[in-house]
Image: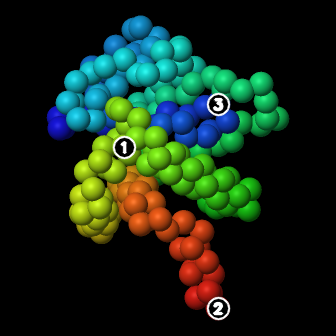
Amino acid sequence: MSSDNKKLIIKDQDGNILDLVKTNEKGFNKSIENSALWVLDSETDRLLPYSDTSAFVSLVDRIHWYECVFEKKTAENSEKPQENVIFSGKNGENTSETAENAEKSSNFLQNLEKLIKDRHEKMPEGSYTTHLFKSGYEKIRKKTGEEAFELVLAKKREDIVYEAADLVYHMMVLLESENISFGEVVAELARREG
């Protein structure tokens, strides 16, 4: 994998994660030029057009990852777009956890868990999550361990946030591969409270 490859988080305008893939600077620039997303195939590392060819609302380089927002396709419109709290705080900005942010974080984690489960069931081509499931349980365990190690080694605040996000994602893939819900982990934490 090329060193300039980055994770690409694809969301709708409400902040719901639609997909997790990878692209590189060439794909980012090509996407901007064509107003259509270009991503790396998880198996061949070839730059290909994303399966959803509709124009995106925004595409941003967040230093450690790319973020793309597609227009929400349902007829429902919420009053206020959901903020992606997990990935806020770029460049060390203060992101204090309010009650509202805690609820948004919980919703985000539920959406992420649903997305990972959906990827496990449907195994769509070009998805990094699909690639992990196809690689098998041992690869998922190894990758989760690597992410934990990278978190421990991170020094700067933004690197700690980035590596923590990677660890949470890979841990959730590991849980799904073992048919364990994230709710079971939360219940265990709640049991230990006090």
Residue 43 in percent (x, y) is at: 23, 35
Query: Based on the displayed image, in which of its 4 quarters is residue 161 positioned?
Result: bottom left
Of 120 and 18, which appears nearest the observer?
120
In space, the residues marked 1 and 3 are separated at their CA atoms by 24 Å
Residue 130: mark in rendering: 1
Query: Based on the displayed image, in which of its 4 quarters is residue 24 positioned?
Result: top left
Quarter of the figure with the N terminus: top left
Residue located at (71% from left, 36% from top): 81
* Residue 169 vertical position relative to residue 25 in the rendered view, above or below: below
N-terminal-most mark, 1 or 3: 3
Residue 13: mark in rendering: 3
Q: Secondary structure at mark 1?
A: helix
Residue 81: mark in rendering: none
Residue 86 in percent (x, y) is at: 54, 52
- Judging by the rendered image, the residue that carries numbered circle 2 is 194
In space, the residues marked 1 and 2 are separated at their CA atoms by 39 Å
Q: Secondary structure at mark 3?
A: loop
- CA neighbours of label 2 inside 10 A, class few (<14), some (14 to 19), many (20+): few
In space, the residues marked 3 and 2 are separated at their CA atoms by 38 Å
N-terminal-most mark, 3 or 2: 3
Of 162 and 174, which appears nearest the observer?
174
- CA neighbours of label 1 inside 10 A, class few (<14), some (14 to 19), many (20+): many
Residue located at (57% from left, 50% from top): 114
